[in-house]
Image (spheres, rainbow, N blue to C red):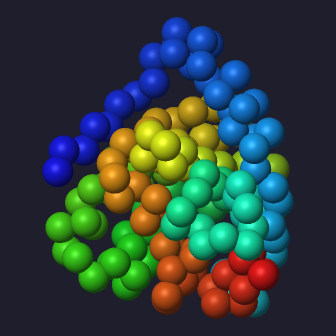
Amino acid sequence: MGTAFQKVAITTVLMFGSFGSWAHAQSLNKCGNGPLMVGQKQVGVASYFAQNCNLPWQSQNMQMDFSYTQNIPEWAFKRAATYLLKRNIKDQKMHAVFNPITDLYRPVNSGDLYQLKYSHATHTLSLYLNQKIQGQLQNPQAQQYFNIWLGPQPFSAKLKQQLIK
């Protein structure tokens, strides 16, 4: 199983990024949102978008937005993602598949927006920071990255319930 990881070239972003983002956003519906809580402190808001909010998330295009109200260091994202993927995906070999996306996380400041977008047709997971693409992962299992928030043992059970009502 080959993992194709690539930084998107500027020409690709210009040719497909704007239209692709627009087309992707046009086909998705907002399904739910909720506060991102770390302990008792709210650090932002998460929103979940899908083609059909009544269908399982694993079978469609989807997107999650994370709007931050607090500064968060990149190591916190990386550590949490790694831990939650291990907790939710039992196949040890799959953990390495997600390292290229997890490695792209950068620190955020209040007002920053992370977006994870998934194309079911191409099995492509894209990470954006403030609407600038950071990178992509193309793999038949790429959508499983969303187990961090929507899996059996998510970041927050309460948040999961608010996202996929």
Q: Is residue 19 visible from the viewing direction of this image?
A: yes
What residue sits 80% from the left and 39% below the top? 26
Point out residue 115 in the picture as x, y percentages from the top left corner: 65, 49
As displayed, is residue 160 above or below residue 124?
below
87 to the left or right of 4: right
The one of 43 and 94 positioned closer to us in this rendering: 94
The one of 144 and 74 positioned closer to us in this rendering: 144
Q: Quadrant of residue 38?
A: bottom right
Point out residue 25 in the picture as x, y percentages from the top left corner: 76, 41
User: Tag count in the figure?
Assistant: 0
5 to the left or right of 128: left
What residue sits 59% from the left and 68% below the top? 57
As displayed, is residue 162 above or below residue 76?
below
164 to the left or right of 103: right
Point out residue 148 in the picture as x, y percentages from the top left corner: 50, 73
Point out residue 119 in the picture as x, y percentages from the top left corner: 54, 45
Q: Quadrant of residue 6?
A: top left
What residue sits 71% from the left and 55% below the top? 51
Quarter of the figure with the C terminus:
bottom right
What residue sits 57% from the left and 33% below the top? 133
133 to the left or right of 22: left
Q: Is residue 109 visible from the viewing direction of this image?
A: no
As displayed, is residue 110 above or below residue 128?
below
